[in-house]
Image: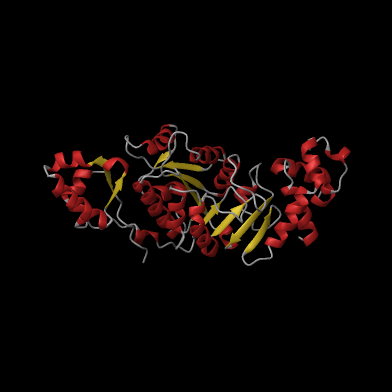
Amino acid sequence: MTQQTLLDWATLALTPGIGPQRFLQLLQRFGDAGHACRAGHGQLRDILDSKTLAALDAGDGARAAEAALQWAAGADCHLLTLNDDDYPCQLAEAGSAPPLLFARGRRSLLAQPMLAVVGSRHATPQGADNARDFSQRLAAHGYSIVSGLAGGIDAAAHEGALPEAASTIAVIGTGIDRVYPARNRELAHRIAGHGLILSEFALGTPPLAGHFPQRNRIIAGLARGCLVVEAAPQSGSLITARLALEAGRDVMAIPGSIHNPQARGCHRLIRDGARLVESADDVLDEIGRLPAAPYAKATATPAASDADAHPLLAAIGYDPVDSDTLAARLKLTAGELYAMLLELELAGHIESLDGGRYQRRSPAPSRPT
């Protein structure tokens, strides 16, 4: 694609109000983006409304396109179009596939099989551990982990997969030159260095609420399957799961405690037919194992550690529990109990929660050899 052709394509794609479906209608009508950009109102009026025609006339898309081409001249910065050979086939098949994507990082990851791992922004410590653990193990098997760079489960999923060769892909709901939430800035820089960041939005686009459901359709479209780790009943990750299901993808969910509000969305998905998964092996049974992967060695059941046999861990169980309940279960004084809690918390075996509650953490996964 020549620079002028790419400029015309980007102009059409980035003009407010056009969107993926109208973009394809214009291509079908005029044959290429250049002819569509330079067509008269009479030829465009049955596809574009007056507001979109005004934006095209005002040059909003043209200015955004020029900025995009300048941005793409930077190191590891790419503009990906539906016409490119490495545009992901599964995403291209969707009727709402974005005609233009900004990509920063390892563009070669687009050729990897992908799995979406999503969930609540308000993850419990156990939920974050599960997201990190599952993502690391599945990336070690060869799946690039796709998520949305939000806080909570998304961030943990990216963190878990990032060190692996298959790494991680972050699909964001802002311009690619912005990071939201800001606390994930350092993570975003690491993903840009070893993984890949994708956005369909023009440079400088702020985090608007309506953009995140749009972002979710890309996450669902890229991946072979969607794993929901934790989700409240109104979680946006359930939108991703629904879109994945509508696209014919495998949808899986990790069950949680009946006392954890962040597990109720997962339980609803399971009731509605999502596959209940308790391990990365369960996920691989659903979406398929990739050839020549070192995964089997990484998933051997570890021997019980000394920490696993600690009476306080047995008393905590697998649900959050308050200190009064623990003291009663173990018949300990407050001083004796807090000494044991501090020891296990410093060792990373438990996590303190709001309201004076405690929860055990999953052991760190063993690494592939």
Quadrant in the picture for residue 23: top right
Residue drawn at x 46%, y 52% is 155
Question: Which quarter of the rendered picture does the N terminus lie within?
Answer: bottom right
Quadrant in the picture for residue 25: top right
Question: Which quarter of the rendered picture does the C terminus lie within?
Answer: bottom left
Does residue 154 appear to the left or right of 89 in the view shown? left
Coloring applied to the structure: secondary structure
Question: Residue 343 versus residue 36: which sits nearer the camera?
Answer: 343
Residue drawn at x 30%, y 55% is 363
Does residue 333 appear to the left or right of 276 in the view shown? left
Q: Is residue 128 visible?
A: yes
| Residue 169 percent location from the top left of the image | 53, 55
| Residue 188 percent location from the top left of the image | 52, 58
| Residue 115 percent location from the top left of the image | 49, 50
| Residue 366 percent location from the top left of the image | 33, 60
Does residue 338 appear to the left or right of 264 in the view shown? left
Question: Residue 109 versus residue 300: which sits nearer the camera?
Answer: 109
Number of marks in picture: 0
Q: Is residue 319 visible?
A: no
Task: Please say if 358 is above or below 306.
Answer: above
Task: Please say if 203 is above or below 164.
Answer: above
Task: Please say if 200 is above or below 296.
Answer: above
